[in-house]
Amino acid sequence: MIARRDLAVCVAARTDLSPTCFRLTLTAEGPVEAVPGQFGMLSCVEGFDPFLRRAFSLAGVSQRRGSTEVEFLIKEVGKGTTLLRHATPGSELRLLAPLGNGFSLDPGAHRLALVAGGIGLPPVLFAAEVLAGRETRFDLYLGAANVAELLEVERCGKAAAAVGGEAVLTTDDGSRGEHAFVTTALARRLSQGRVYDRVLACGPTPMLAALTELAREHALETELSLEEPMACGVGVCLGCVVELADGRYVPTCKEGPVFPAARLAARWWP
Amino acid sequence: MIARRDLAVCVAARTDLSPTCFRLTLTAEGPVEAVPGQFGMLSCVEGFDPFLRRAFSLAGVSQRRGSTEVEFLIKEVGKGTTLLRHATPGSELRLLAPLGNGFSLDPGAHRLALVAGGIGLPPVLFAAEVLAGRETRFDLYLGAANVAELLEVERCGKAAAAVGGEAVLTTDDGSRGEHAFVTTALARRLSQGRVYDRVLACGPTPMLAALTELAREHALETELSLEEPMACGVGVCLGCVVELADGRYVPTCKEGPVFPAARLAARWWP
Amino acid sequence: MSVRLGVELGKLAVANPIMAASGTFGYGLDLLEFCPPERLGAVVTKGLSPKPRRGSPTPRIVETAAGMINAIGLQNIGVEAFCIEALPVLRQRGAVVAVNVFGERMEEYVEVIERCEREEGIAAYELNVSCPNVTAGGIEFGHDPAQLERLTRMGRAATRRVLWVKLSPNAPDLVGTARAAVDGGADGLTLINTLRAMAIDAEKRRPVLARGCGGLSGPAIKPIALRMVWEVHRALPSVPLVGIGGVETGRDVVEFLLAGASAVQVGTAIFRDPAAPLHILGELERFCAEHGIAEVRELVGALEWH
Amino acid sequence: MSVRLGVELGKLAVANPIMAASGTFGYGLDLLEFCPPERLGAVVTKGLSPKPRRGSPTPRIVETAAGMINAIGLQNIGVEAFCIEALPVLRQRGAVVAVNVFGERMEEYVEVIERCEREEGIAAYELNVSCPNVTAGGIEFGHDPAQLERLTRMGRAATRRVLWVKLSPNAPDLVGTARAAVDGGADGLTLINTLRAMAIDAEKRRPVLARGCGGLSGPAIKPIALRMVWEVHRALPSVPLVGIGGVETGRDVVEFLLAGASAVQVGTAIFRDPAAPLHILGELERFCAEHGIAEVRELVGALEWH
Ligand SMILES: Cc1cc2nc3c(=O)[nH]c(=O)nc-3n(C[C@H](O)[C@H](O)[C@H](O)COP(=O)(O)OP(=O)(O)OC[C@H]3O[C@@H](n4cnc5c(N)ncnc54)[C@H](O)[C@@H]3O)c2cc1C
Ligand SMILES: Cc1cc2nc3c(=O)[nH]c(=O)nc-3n(C[C@H](O)[C@H](O)[C@H](O)COP(=O)(O)OP(=O)(O)OC[C@H]3O[C@@H](n4cnc5c(N)ncnc54)[C@H](O)[C@@H]3O)c2cc1C
Ligand SMILES: Cc1cc2nc3c(=O)[nH]c(=O)nc-3n(C[C@H](O)[C@H](O)[C@H](O)COP(=O)(O)O)c2cc1C
Ligand SMILES: Cc1cc2nc3c(=O)[nH]c(=O)nc-3n(C[C@H](O)[C@H](O)[C@H](O)COP(=O)(O)O)c2cc1C
Ligand code: FES
Ligand code: FES
């Protein structure tokens, strides 16, 4: 296991990616290691408002000379994310990372499907860029409500292209790419005979539910990155549990956030 | 009474004045009027931490074209003042002002004594600069623990000089000016026969207590600007009361913060 | 979309569900330029006693995490001065006035009501039996159902106006006291008053407040207030409730209404923003408009349990 | 200046007054790299029942102003698994272990204790009679002095180890329950557990938590916890108390000690900072050094009233 640390990080840059989303780049001293699918608990503020840290999937970790750049893609949905969107470059935050278990990126894979819906992109993008570096072939399916909310399209395309994979874009309103849900785009290719060793996905619950159905149909190994409200991020509060197929509640932060779809309780899917 | 308003103000500048104190300049749209001794309730932060606004005496109010510059001198003592010390220029705060009653600066005065201890300077400086503009003669007594904590010495000197008055500096450690308490410096001049119509003062409680003694001895009219913990600043919470000589508790924020020393209960002085 | 803001609290219909809470809005006239009292559903006065009260020594207030503790000790100008100085102005402005009533003995509550009965322009009385900041009277009545019922009955006998009892969150048996107040003839219940609390000065090794303890208010207590409103509403679903405790936003109001309150009072929030009740009212209206809620009253008690 | 950090809780002497609270530190081994359990005065385990418990459905937690509400429902691995999997490691590391004991019936409390009695390395039991998140058992024992005394007596009969009872802030009569626990044979009292509270989702018109209500913790409740510690200390000055509720800083610890606690537990703060207990201990030591306090124990109950 990679050592968890509570890092003092410095806001290096914030870049708007869409009307609601932005990229937050943080610098930590020394090396930081992590695998795609892992996440961090980020303090948004000094003081008690908001009170708890926020969970964000790592979207990239790049070693620099003597320091590490940690990247997040964040959607502004409330107090904490609004504060982060307005964080002053140079200001200090705390980041407890890396946490949880990431995607299975075993080198032997023939071809993987990476699927991201909306702000589910960060762990998928991290995975794509790592896989591109390892020359593991994958297709990347990226869906969003509309063209404005398709994030990091270029990076996605570049990563997929590097290993001869396809970057499939879909929007709910057809304003760019296929006019379809991202799962429909995947289904189409599967029924056309495209074969994957495994699907790695992150996105809204309905998307993950549809994906699970699809995976079952095609007997496809599928790993899902889940979100549950979190307080500690390290398995001690038991606030973030998800129900497994065997009936147990396990902390998403510690046993996940990435789970094989088959391990999850059916009733997890609404 | 000057109309109170809840102003959206913008941080224009922060300037360090001493190891613990800084000047905060805020800009408000439109005209703002106030008299020396009045104060404002300033929100230090959005959100609940800290929860209440903080009271600060106005140190100056200057009309600009279409806007007003409001000046505070602030000592960093806790959460709120630390946040203000690090407020980003351009960020917005809320300021409820002007509040309370100021010093009596009646134009007929022959000569006034203005006395400030430490961070008691802001209302006194405001008074000095207003009096200098009105050509009312005054001496300004400014005391501090040491030379580093003597704030705005030049402005004090300039204001007093403008009306032929003296700016008397004292430090507790003798590192600048007279090696004495500011009240001792005043006492010396009084016993040397200097005559004042009135003393206007702000500073730590022991200083105000000594001053009250002195005022009684020399039958000097004296006005003191008091500090009490405040929640609302407008007289509705009754948290900030001070005991008067007649036994009543009155809200400092509304009936003060400037009170004639003779109106205050003897036991107010510890 | 236009939203109907009016709500009914039993026989009292108010134009909107936002009231200023007792002790945080003076006698309704201190913040005219920020929050004219006639624009609120009602204004509740600072607790009034038969004679003026000096209140507690200082320090009386201290800030805490997302809240504050106060021990004002019910300093007030007395019912007589209120009737002469403040009430005529409130009446003239058209404000809906609720008088928060306080006494050290039961008879004093009645005295306050009787004095007020001689005046027009008072819509309701709110019996404050829950102030944690006075040693004599008050708090005991709010903690003992039998005494509370008796006190409410005496108040009831003194007036045909609307009578509310303001419940203490410190009472051993919340629902029991609620029931006692209703049995005694209360038309509605307001809850909650402040929670007994303490702050300590680590340097001085003393309580921060002169009285030692005081009452905790503000957003910190909202989750407790919501729970209590829901508990009382569930036990006494037909009794009109006024919810209080940490209301800062229109969304907070919606939460209290869902839990079973027909109106809310805004207290400590006024200290952070003198126009808080109006701002909150605006937010409530916007929330309703955005969520297709035509009438605020639809929300009352509309919480769905799982 | 070197500061002596050790304190005594009756017959239990600990190296320092900072403990990790039940339910916020797992079984003591989850945060080894941030907060080694052996460096704390004690670690209190998550509440243990005779059999593993699944706990409540989700959502289980929600953030509030300066705090959070939880309804975990005492999910735990059961006393057997604890004794086999966690305790040996804790013992080997030299941690002082307090087992938080929970049962739905009184006999289950005894079962947990009896199982633990077969193991070395347990310093104390903390009877959790105050968890607001379970319907059966637990909470009733903590609210009814007679039942609590009986339960404590049963616990007392089962062990000669140190026995604490963790008091509920929701109990009708705090001092009464405290006294009952002591009469039943408790060596000390820990207080407070969480306050019953509720959060509502204004959009969904439902409680945020699956169980509806939960327990409020964090800085929001500190002023209430301090008051309760002081109240119990004043009533039972010779009973060792462990203070809990919103401790985030060394200064908070000083406040609890002054109010009469001999030690404190750090709970929710751990979620914001996995090394919180150690950071707080460091701050406490610095506070003492700066204020010329040679021994932390000097502070216990040293509050001066006005
Ligand atoms: C393991 C994990 C990884 C995540 N990765 C990312 C990411 O890479 N990028 C990103 O933008 N977001 C991510 N999230 C979601 C992110 O944590 C929430 O959006 C964030 O906590 C909201 O904080 P806030 O203060 O802005 O919103 P709040 O004001 O707290 O809440 C606003 C809204 O967001 C909902 N919300 C709050 N917390 C969560 C949560 N933990 N999960 C889901 N919804 C929540 C609330 O119910 C509310 O409707 C992740 C969550 C988890 C658990
Ligand atoms: C009418 C009035 C005018 C004031 N004018 C000025 C001014 O011009 N410049 C300036 O620097 N300060 C002024 N103060 C004091 C200022 O309000 C406090 O220093 C400030 O509230 C501290 O906030 P904080 O969050 O930094 O400290 P906190 O973290 O709240 O407290 C830190 C320390 O300051 C003490 N303190 C907190 N609030 C007050 C208060 N209202 N009065 C006195 N001590 C307090 C606390 O007891 C504590 O010891 C004035 C106060 C009043 C009432
Ligand atoms: C400074 C202050 C004074 C108060 N005075 C009274 C009072 O006189 N009578 C009363 O019934 N409640 C009084 N209260 C309680 C409030 O009306 C309200 O019940 C409580 O503060 C909780 O609401 P909040 O969190 O919105 O402030 C007072 C509260 C504060 C903060
Ligand atoms: C997520 C969570 C789980 C808890 N589980 C338990 C428990 O199992 N047994 C218990 O006695 N107290 C439990 N508590 C209560 C804490 O031990 C503590 O009494 C309370 O949280 C107040 O302290 P704090 O404000 O420092 O968190 C739990 C608290 C939280 C937040
Ligand atoms: S967030 Fe605390 S256990 Fe997962
Ligand atoms: S601060 Fe509220 S009355 Fe003065």
Image: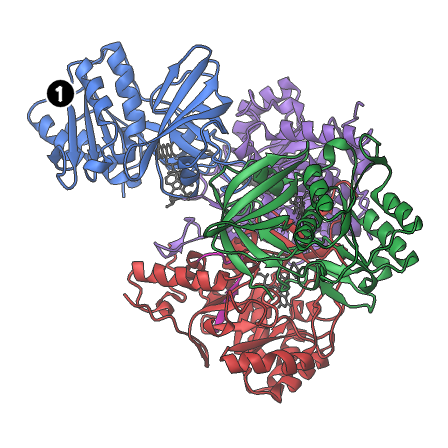
Chain colours: A green, B blue, C purple, D red
Of residues A221 and B204, the one drawn nearer to the viewer in this rendering: A221
Q: Which residues are magenta?
A: D240-249
In this picture, residue A232 sits left or right of residue B153: right
- Please name the residue shown 66% across and 20% down the image: C94
Of residues B164 and A113, the one drawn nearer to the viewer in this rendering: A113
Q: Position of residue B72 (x, y in %)?
A: 36, 28
Q: Position of residue B184 (x, y in %)?
A: 13, 34
Q: Quadrant of residue C293?
A: top right
Q: Position of residue B138 (x, y in %)?
A: 19, 18
Q: Amino acid at mark 1?
A: Val
Number of callouts in the render?
1
> The residue tagged with tag 1: helix, strand or loop?
loop
Q: Quadrant of residue D24?
A: bottom right
Task: Quickly name the residue at label 1.
Answer: B195
Quarter of the figure that contains the C terminus of chain D: bottom left
Main SS, magenta residues: loop
Of residues C146 and B32, the one drawn nearer to the viewer in this rendering: B32
D268 w.r.t. A11: above or below? below
- Please name the residue shown 83% across and 43% down the image: A182
Q: Does label 1 point to a residue whose CB lies under 8 Å from ligand 2?
A: no
Is residue C282 one of those drawn in magenta?
no
Q: Is residue B32 visible?
A: no
D140 w.r.t. C219: above or below? below
Residue at the limit of the structure toward the left, as seen here:
B192
